[in-house]
Image (spheres, grey):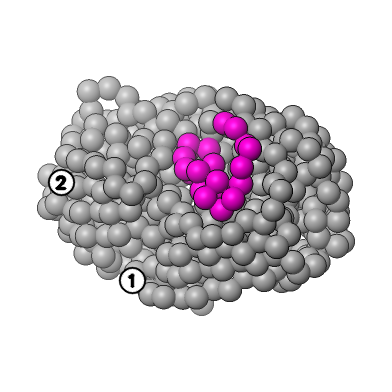
């Protein structure tokens, strides 16, 4: 599917509530499936990735009922609890969702089941050994395709606790190990080289699983065995989705938008800190912390933006927002450098290579290396044709670029946005973006 992003005639204005957070939606569904009893979830993201998780836990024996409410999903989940997951009738399809595949490995590792996890062509190119390595040390076994990729068969069984130091900061690996730790007798501890998303540590206690943390030592741990308990949870808006609307407002002169009820977890809003450092006018109004910080963003354009350096330590808190930050950097004075972003090469696409190629196709001044990207500005991007490579973050970043380009930006494989933000074009339209036909 091709999407035509056309330059807008006037400023963006209004209020939009972005869909539920993808990371929290995955975890809420998984933890509910693991739990004893019936959980009630509201505001769950209705996207292809989250649907993959829902179908996966159904295949493993959880009973799930869904109802679409206000653009999201209300879900009731009867978990398998202490009886454990059932062996499915065939392979479990994780679609395009790396979160589904990697977290399920941790969920299944401690149960006497054999489950084969598959995925689409894109997911089947992504590495899985970083997850299976610590789980094998705990006692699980895995059979993987050549190159340590999907399909992966999990051979679960009794586990031993582990004290594990992550080679690279990864919330998915950390979560997989902690979830496996709920089945191991004793303390399972994970050490991080840099802070990464802590949704699991915040959300598991809501489901009756105490999680210890030490911010100074960058550690998190669980004491097992422990069976999660059913819970009620209302998923807040996704900051990674909000980032595209924030960037859109900054790209279009005179814009003034409000985004209520956005999750503001410090490990997820590095992009806001970078934009504020560049001079963007963004107001953050924190409302509640239960168990995640949630609040309202107001974004006003007009300020002259200055280039900055994004350091490797910052990258885990903004890895998904690098594409749209690069678009904003094209209009900033000077050269913005993104250092330590090699992780982009193992996303839904080689996101680093694809981003550099796409920006150049639109007239951007870009340089890149194995793990870095530089964008020189200010440059008004031109129209042209780009390919999302089936990557939802690239598709939306190019759409944002088209709002302030000299001519239409045509984006191939735009249907990739359904992975995380199916209502993206509708929300842009609500802010005044017209003429972009999907």
Q: Say which element carries label 2.
A: strand
Give how far across and how far down residue 305 sits, in percent: 78, 66
Q: Say which element carries label 1.
A: loop
Q: Choose between 83 and 381: the one closer to the eye.
A: 381
Residue that protrudes farthest toward the top in the picture = 90
| 80 with respect to 391 (left or right) | left
| Front tag of 1 and 2 | 1
Instruction: Give the residue drawn at x 78%, y 32%.
Output: 384
Q: Which mark is residue 389?
A: none
Image quadrant holding the N terminus, namely top right
Instruction: Give the residue drawn at x 23%, y 51%.
Output: 32
Where on the picture, by quarter, is residue 298? bottom right
Where on the picture, by quarter, is residue 119? top left
- Location of mark 2 (residue): 78
- Location of mark 1 (residue): 290
Q: Few, some or many C-alpha atoms within 10 Å of disc 1 (few <14, some 14-19, many ≥20)? A: few
Instruction: Give the residue drawn at x 19%, y 47%.
Output: 76
The reply to whether residue 26 is in sight is: no
Span highlighted in magenta in the image: 417-438
**Residue 435 on the magenta segment:** yes
């Amino acid at each position: 599917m091709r999407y035509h992003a056309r330059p807008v005639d006037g400023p963006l204005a209004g209020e939009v509530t972005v869909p539920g957070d993808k990371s929290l939606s995955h975890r809420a569904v998984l933890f509910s499936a693991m739990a004893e009893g019936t959980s009630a979830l509201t505001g769950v993201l209705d996207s292809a990735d989250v649907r993959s998780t829902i179908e996966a836990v159904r295949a493993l024996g959880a009973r799930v009922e869904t109802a679409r409410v206000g653009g999201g999903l209300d879900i009731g989940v009867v978990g398998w609890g202490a009886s454990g997951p059932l062996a499915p009738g065939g392979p479990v399809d994780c679609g395009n969702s790396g979160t589904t595949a990697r977290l399920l490995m941790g969920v299944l590792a401690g149960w006497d089941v054999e489950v084969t996890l598959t995925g689409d062509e894109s997911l089947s190119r992504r590495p899985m050994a970083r997850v299976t390595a610590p789980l094998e040390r705990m006692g699980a076994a895995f059979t993987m395709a050549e190159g340590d990729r999907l399909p992966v068969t999990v051979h679960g069984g009794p586990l031993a606790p582990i004290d594990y130091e992550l080679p690279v900061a990864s919330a998915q690996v950390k979560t997989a190990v902690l979830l496996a730790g709920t089945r191991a007798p004793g303390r399972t501890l994970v050490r991080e080289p840099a802070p990464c998303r802590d949704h699991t540590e915040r959300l598991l206690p809501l489901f009756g699983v105490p999680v210890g943390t030490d911010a100074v030592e960058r550690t998190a741990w669980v004491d097992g065995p422990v069976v999660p308990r059913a819970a009620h949870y209302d998923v807040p808006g996704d900051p990674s989705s909000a980032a595209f609307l924030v960037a859109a407002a900054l790209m279009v002169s005179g814009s003034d938008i409000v985004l209520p009820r956005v999750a503001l977890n410090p490990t997820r809003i590095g992009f806001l800190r970078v934009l504020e450092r560049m001079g963007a006018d963004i107001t953050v109004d924190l409302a509640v912390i239960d168990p995640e910080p949630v609040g309202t963003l107001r974004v006003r354009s007009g300020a002259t933006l200055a280039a900055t350096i994004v350091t490797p330590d910052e990258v885990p808190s903004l890895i998904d927002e690098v594409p749209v930050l690069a678009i904003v950097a094209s209009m900033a004075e000077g050269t913005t450098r993104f250092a330590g972003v090699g992780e982009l090469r193992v996303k839904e696409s080689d996101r680093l290579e694809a981003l550099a190629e796409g920006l150049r196709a639109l007239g951007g001044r870009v340089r890149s290396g194995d793990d870095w990207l530089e964008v020189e500005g200010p440059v008004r991007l031109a129209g042209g044709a780009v390919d999302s490579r089936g990557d939802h973050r690239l598709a939306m970043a190019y759409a944002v670029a088209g709002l302030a380009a000299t001519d239409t930006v045509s984006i191939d494989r735009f249907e990739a946005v359904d992975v995380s933000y199916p209502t993206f074009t509708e929300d842009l339209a609500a802010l005044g973006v017209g003429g972009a036909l999907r």
